[in-house]
Amino acid sequence: MAAPTALDFAWPLAFLLLPLPFLAMRFLSPSGEAGGALRVPSTLVADFADGQAVLSSQKRRLFLSWLLWLLLVVAIAGPRTVTTAPAAPASGRDIVLSLDVSGSMERPDFEVGGDKKRRMDVLKDMARAFVLGRAGDRVGLVIFGERAYVAAPLSFDVAAVAKTVDGIDVGLAGRSTAIGEGLGLALKKLSDSTAQAKVVILLSDGAQNAGTVQPGSAAELAKSLGIRVDTIAMGPLDLGEGERGDEGVDVATLSGIASQAGGTAYRVRTTEQLKEVMASIDALETSPSEAPATIVHASLWPFPGALALAVAGLMMLGRRGRR
């Protein structure tokens, strides 16, 4: 719940300008010689026919002049409302999803509601739900195929990251699989993080067949950086199974990465298993962290500015009326 709204000024020192007109009249006005004749502007001669009217007119002009100056100074000082809104609770955890978008993710071998769906579509559904449930975490997204790319930087805006998940698809990073590149880039995004807990969730449905970074080397780097890596091996076949033998997921490599980096290795063959795994990761204990309050300023200077314009208009109308 937001705290009560207060009023302050962006530049309070501007109020030092308030006595400026008085000082200007006091020290800069020309003074005549002693005994010199009093010079009266010709435009005011007619006003002296009625002394009371002249006095009243002068007082009114003086009042309006000071009011105009006061309003201008208030506008310059930048009046504003200040509302302190508590930020959403932060978990103290940064999470990067590193997702395989290689050609094999095109295969329609995952069943949803009796229909066959592509691995990519099932993954996107699960990843979106996972990201939207991470309020309080900073979440980022890396995709990899033949190469690796940052699809979404670390952000508390989980809705924006979830929208990015909706936009990924098979082949965006090439058709091959560079697991080491995908993990390495995720680690790079977390290397400067000051979060109490840093996690990479690495999902692949294949085996390393592209890239220059070896998965084992990336896992060692994760260990040295204190970054936990959970891996998900997705697909119905293990590497070596099936007619060709190279269509399955490299469970051994992904398990080795998780073991080296202090994480957990998961094996997923069905949609239900993927749901269970994502729920299990989602339930990981968070590390509480104080979130800074958000201070919201709303500028009010247009109000005294508009009043100053109105006063200036009245003064101009008064001068025209005396002509």
Image (tube, rainbow, N blue to C red):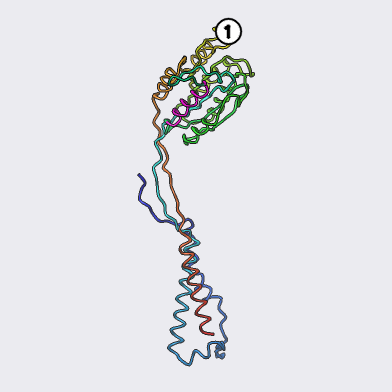
Instruction: Name the quadrant of the C terminus.
Output: bottom right
Horizontal side, residue 59 vs residue 102: left or right: left
Residue at (35, 44) in percent of width and height: 1
Examine the image and state in which quarter residue 212 appears.
Answer: top right
Examine the image and state in which quarter residue 153 appears.
Answer: top right
In reply to whether residue 182 is colored magenta, the answer given is no
Residue at (56, 76) in percent of width and height: 28
From which residue to which does the magenta span run? 118-132
Return the residue at label 1: 245
| Dot 1 alpha-carbon crowd within 10 angstroms: few under 14, some 14 to 19, many 20 or more | few
Q: Secondary structure at mark 1?
A: loop
Horizontal side, residue 80 vs residue 190: left or right: left
**Image x and y of residue 244, in percent:** 59, 8
**Image x and y of residue 49, in percent:** 48, 93
Residue at (55, 22) in percent of width and height: 100
- Please identify the dominant SS of the magenta region: helix
Residue 317 vertical position relative to residue 145 in the rendered view, above or below? below
Examine the image and state in which quarter residue 192 appears.
Answer: top right
